[in-house]
Image (cartoon, rainbow, N blue to C red):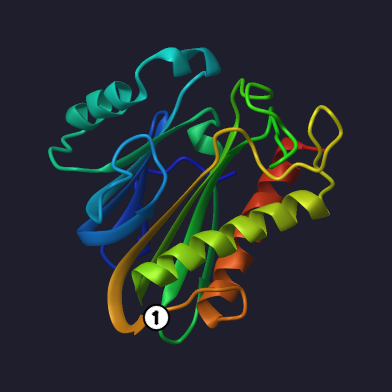
Amino acid sequence: MNPASDSESLLEGVTLTRSGDVLRVSSSTPLRVLGCANVGDDLALTRNIVAMSVETEQQSVDPEQQLHDWAMQAGIHEPFVGLLTTAAAESYIQATEATAKWKLTALLIADLTTRCSAGKTKPGEGNTGGSIDIIILTDASLSMGAMVSAMITATEAKVRALVENRVTTSEGYVATGAPADSVIIGCLSKGERIRQAGPTTQLGYLVGKVVHEGLTRALQAQHVD
């Protein structure tokens, strides 16, 4: 668990701020983004990524309105990427790796009170809340294809952490995630363009490493089994 702090530098020009139940990633220059979120999942560029913690019973409230209301109060008057999570904001895990060329950091917010197994958990079952939300930020320059493959690699690493820690669903299936998981990739687009981020590439290796480390730490902190 990270201590409460006003602001922390993640990358050059990119800061993380925690304010109450909200994590906010702010960039001085636009980030190229790709991912699934409650707000802004169709954006190509943004300077703000927001993760807001809500109680499970609050999920019936319009998520877009909740996020837009907070953004207005926070002075965000431009398009942003925002997601709701049932995990506590202060429980976020941060994992970082770097090479001589670029830096990569992952923010992971996990609520494993409900788990599911892809292809086993049927629609309508196990959808009472819970999510593993992953925000990956890098100063590397990623093509659209590389961002997609980074999301795939992150998902593979998530599943590996769940399998290695023997996390199961309430029915006893191997858990592959939670009902409302999300992955968001943001990059600053500096340097030579990277066109692939699969598990055997340098960037993909680090994506897998930070996601696996972050989720393993979250599982240990929550004593999930």
Q: Residue at x 41, y 85 (%)?
A: 101
Number of numbered tags placed on the structure image: 1
Image-based side of 105 in relation to 132, left or right: left
In the rendered image, the vertical position of residue 110 relative to residue 210, given as above or below: above
Relative to the observer, which residue lies in front, 97 or 2? 97
Which quadrant holds residue 213? bottom right
**Residue 170: image x %, image y %?**
81, 27
**Residue 61: image x %, image y %?**
38, 14
**Residue 202: image x %, image y %?**
54, 81
Image-based side of 121 in relation to 149, left or right: right
Quadrant where the image shows the C terminus: top right
Q: Residues within 10 Å of mark 1 (few under 14, many from 20)?
A: some
In the rendered image, the vertical position of residue 210 relative to residue 195, given as above or below: above
Identify which amino acid the numbered label 1 is placed on.
Answer: Ile
In the rendered image, the vertical position of residue 144 relative to residue 68, given as above or below: below
Relative to the observer, which residue lies in front, 93 or 81? 81
- Callout 1: helix, strand or loop? strand
Relative to the observer, which residue lies in front, 62 or 218? 62
Q: Residue at x 67, y 34 (%)?
A: 112
**Residue 176: image x %, image y %?**
71, 45
- For mark 1, what is the residue? 194
Q: Residue at x 28, y 73 (%)?
A: 189
In the rendered image, the vertical position of residue 77 relative to residue 156, given as above or below: above
Quadrant where the image shows the N terminus: top right
Which quadrant holds residue 126? top right
Which quadrant holds residue 132? top right
Q: Residue at x 59, y 24 (%)?
A: 129
